[in-house]
Image: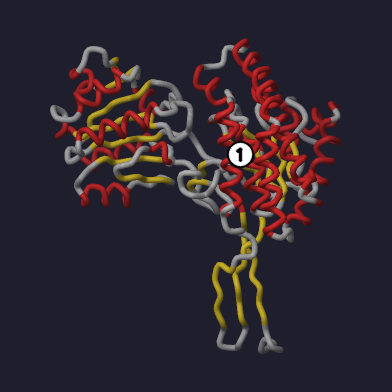
């Protein structure tokens, strides 16, 4: 027995988690064959339940916010945690958007007939039971629960301790909606404790029940999950996102995109952390971009060229090119054209999201094809790295891996497939 498993057993967590696992597996069997209409009805009830429970959710969130403030969480973390009427409505709207998506389960992905007459289909099926471990953002409770339901999966949610009460209040609304729709409330379950031993038990001792784990949070959480999980992991590394401004970029467009990419919401993984500027645009674009960012309240840490433009730019260290600030701080570096941008991103990027701003089609195409990131944009903000903006309704996260899912993880990415083969008496020759 591992140290983590022993600790879980001693604290009674093992029995609790095993019970959750058994219930999730049973619910997954039901969901795999639940008609689309019934799943969509549950999603509509969920959206309405969130609206009706807004008062309770906000009260719970205020409790979490007070605790987070007392613990000295950063402004970026507080922003992730904070809920208000608009954000609750946003959660409800995201669930309704998922209703409008095609049911991914049962779709025929490919079909062909062999010379011997066998008819073969590759058909989408749910993954089964998904464990989702996340930090800060209580809205993940609703997004993840809804996406798993739509894709026919049962889910075990483990939110961060800082959002414990908010997530519980949101989950209560979701569970009630499932029962209203005639589905097992255990299709969406929350780990009822903040004890970290529960996470260790989920990762290492529930292979009988959990098919895949999805972590959503900081690099320490991701590293722990990837290290300790005994089931497949769909995860992402840091959001070290870049915007490269080419000499052929429209200066005004570049300024608007950079400001939005960095400052619209600084605490999300799609926020740009490094600005790369073509050396050929040192006199035309760089001063405008630096002034716009400083005027918007963004701290800049730049290379020698960037510092020479404005004395308010602080000298960057090597660590700045590798830092996911999640705050109003941005690193600035001048590079030798597209080739320089590609080299920097290859050396420092995390494979999340990177953008080029240029009116040169050849430069844009080279960037789009050569940057090896999950999402690459031309003349658009990195903050579009979002499943909702991709038309997926919502997302569980942005996967930077290369196996199974990459980019926004929506309903289609939460399915696998099987082969259905139809014959007419064929037998294989000796």
Label 1 crowd (10 A; few <14 / some 14-19 / many >=20): many
Q: Position of residue 242 (x, y in %)?
A: 35, 35
Number of numbered discs overlaid on the protein picture: 1
Display coloring: secondary structure
Q: Position of residue 131 (x, y in %)?
A: 68, 42
Which residue is located at x 48 percent, y 49 percent? 391
The answer to whether 168 is drawn above or below residue 156 in the figure is above
Name the quarter where the C terminus is drawn: bottom right
Which residue is located at x 65 percent, y 18 percent? 62
User: Relative to residue 360, is residue 44 drawn left or right?
Assistant: right
- Say which residue label 1 marks: 92
The answer to whether 106 is drawn above or below residue 112 in the figure is above
Q: Position of residue 201 (x, y in %)?
A: 75, 35
Name the quarter where the N terminus is drawn: top right
User: Relative to residue 173, is residue 264 drawn left or right?
Assistant: left
Residue nearest the viewer, comparing 290 with 213? 290
Which of the 4 image quadrants contains residue 217?
Answer: top right
Residue 231 visible? The answer is no
Mark 1 residue element: helix
Which residue is located at x 62 percent, y 10 percent? 70
Residue nearest the viewer, comparing 209 with 148? 148
Residue lying at the far top of the rendered structure: 70
Which of the 4 image quadrants contains residue 264?
Answer: top left
């Amino acid at each position: 027995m591992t140290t983590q498993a022993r600790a879980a057993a001693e604290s009674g967590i093992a029995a609790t988690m095993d019970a959750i696992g058994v219930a999730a597996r049973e619910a997954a069997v039901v969901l795999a064959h639940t008609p689309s209409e019934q799943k969509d009805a549950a999603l509509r009830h969920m959206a309405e339940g969130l609206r009706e429970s807004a008062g309770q959710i906000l009260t719970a969130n205020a409790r979490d916010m007070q605790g987070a403030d007392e613990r000295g969480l950063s402004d970026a973390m507080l922003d992730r945690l904070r809920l208000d009427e608009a954000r609750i409505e946003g959660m409800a709207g995201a669930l309704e958007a998922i209703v409008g998506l095609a049911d991914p389960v049962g779709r025929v992905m490919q079909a062909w007939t062999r010379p011997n007459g066998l008819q073969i289909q590759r058909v989408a099926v749910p993954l089964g039971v998904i464990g989702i471990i996340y930090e800060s953002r209580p809205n993940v409770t609703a997004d993840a629960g809804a996406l798993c339901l739509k894709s026919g999966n049962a889910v075990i949610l483990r939110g961060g301790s800082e959002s414990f009460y908010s997530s519980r209040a949101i989950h209560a609304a979701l569970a009630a909606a499932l029962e209203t729709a005639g589905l097992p409330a255990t299709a969406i379950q929350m780990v009822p404790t903040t004890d970290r031993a529960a996470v260790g038990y989920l990762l290492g001792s529930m292979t009988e029940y959990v098919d895949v784990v999805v972590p959503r949070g900081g690099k320490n959480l991701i590293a722990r999950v990837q290290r300790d999980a005994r089931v497949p992991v769909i995860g992402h590394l840091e959001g070290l996102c870049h915007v490269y401004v080419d000499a052929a970029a429209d200066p005004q467009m570049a300024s608007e995109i950079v400001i939005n990419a960095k400052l619209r919401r600084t605490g999300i993984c799609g926020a740009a952390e490094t600005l790369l500027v073509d050396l050929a645009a040192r006199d035309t674009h760089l001063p405008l971009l630096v002034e716009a960012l400083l005027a918007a309240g963004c701290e800049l840490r730049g290379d020698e060229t960037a510092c020479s433009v404005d004395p308010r730019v602080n000298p960057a260290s090597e660590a700045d090119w590798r830092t996911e600030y999640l705050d109003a701080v941005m690193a600035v570096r001048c590079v030798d054209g597209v080739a320089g941008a590609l080299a920097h991103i290859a050396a420092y990027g995390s494979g999340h999201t990177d953008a080029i701003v240029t009116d040169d089609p050849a430069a844009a195409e080279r960037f789009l094809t050569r940057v090896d990131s999950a999402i690459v944009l031309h003349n658009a903000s990195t903050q579009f790295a979002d499943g909702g903006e991709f038309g997926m309704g919502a997302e569980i996260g942005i996967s930077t891996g290369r196996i199974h899912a990459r980019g926004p993880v929506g309903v289609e990415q939460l399915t696998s497939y099987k082969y259905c083969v139809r014959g007419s008496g064929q037998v294989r020759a000796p």
